Image (cartoon, rainbow, N blue to C red):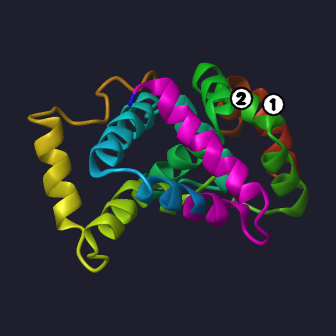
Amino acid sequence: MNIDEFWTVIETARTDAASASGNQGQAFASALVEQLAATSKQTILEYQQCFDQLHGAIYRWDVWAAGYLIGGGCSDDAFMDFRAGLIAQGREWYERANTAPDVLAQHPDVIAAAAEGSDEALFNETVNYAASYAYERINGDEDNNCTFHDDYDQFCGPRADLEPTDMGESFDFDDTSEMQARLPELARLLLEHSGA
């Protein structure tokens, strides 16, 4: 699976989820699992490899700061979910956010969440595990995902930590003036609504 094929999988799941009622984030994750489970083990492993590369590429302080503003805070685990949620937004939003995370102030879900005082826009934990859930379905073993991780480790071979050591310049997410300087649009949108 190349990167274009990966994004086709994401866009197809987004299209499938758009017709579902209820929580769109959960609908996307379910559609993604269904789509992957209809392929092969090899395709799922290749999908996960692309996912990990994209997930790791946005492991940066500026992206984390965007997640911190959008989520009203952002732990290590929440940052995993935020990056998965960015991938779930599709190629265009992912690439825009990768280039300049402040652009997320223009995302309709972020705008709506700010207006509602919600801190859940763009976070999607289940997307992190879509490949393993789909793999389990193919194996007929939904109680134990050891096979997926074992097979994935064998597929990838020896590999370094997926999270880069250079995350860019670190800064204080709780310093309002710093956040306003680095992410002015998100700070304006989210700090004003929160009264900070």
- What secondary structure prevails in the magenta region? helix
Q: What residue span does the magenta drawing correspond to?
A: 2-30
Q: Position of residue 143 (x, y in %)?
A: 28, 80
Name the residue carrying label 1.
185
Q: Nearer the viewer, residue 182 or 103?
A: 103
Name the residue carrying label 2.
102
Q: Residue drawn 83% across and 34% down?
A: 106
Q: Nearer the viewer, residue 128 or 10?
A: 10
Q: Position of residue 82 (x, y in %)?
A: 55, 49
Classify mark 2: helix, strand or loop.
helix
The residue type indicated by label 1 comes to Glu
Q: What is the crowding at mark 1: few (fewer than 14 residues within 10 Å), some, or many (at least 20)?
A: some
Looking at the image, is mark 2 or mark 1 earlier in the sequence?
Answer: 2
The residue type indicated by label 2 comes to Asp
Q: Residue drawn 77% across and 56% down?
A: 18
- Spatial distance from mark 2 to mark 1, Cα to Cα? 6 Å
In the picture, measured across the screen, residue 143 lies left or right of residue 84, that is left
Magenta includes 4?
yes
Q: Are the residues tagged 2 and 1 within 8 Å (C-beta)?
A: yes
Magenta includes 189?
no
Q: Residue drawn 73% across and 35% down?
A: 104
In the picture, measured across the screen, residue 142 lies left or right of residue 101, that is left
Mark carried by residue 173? none
Q: Is residue 172 visible?
A: no
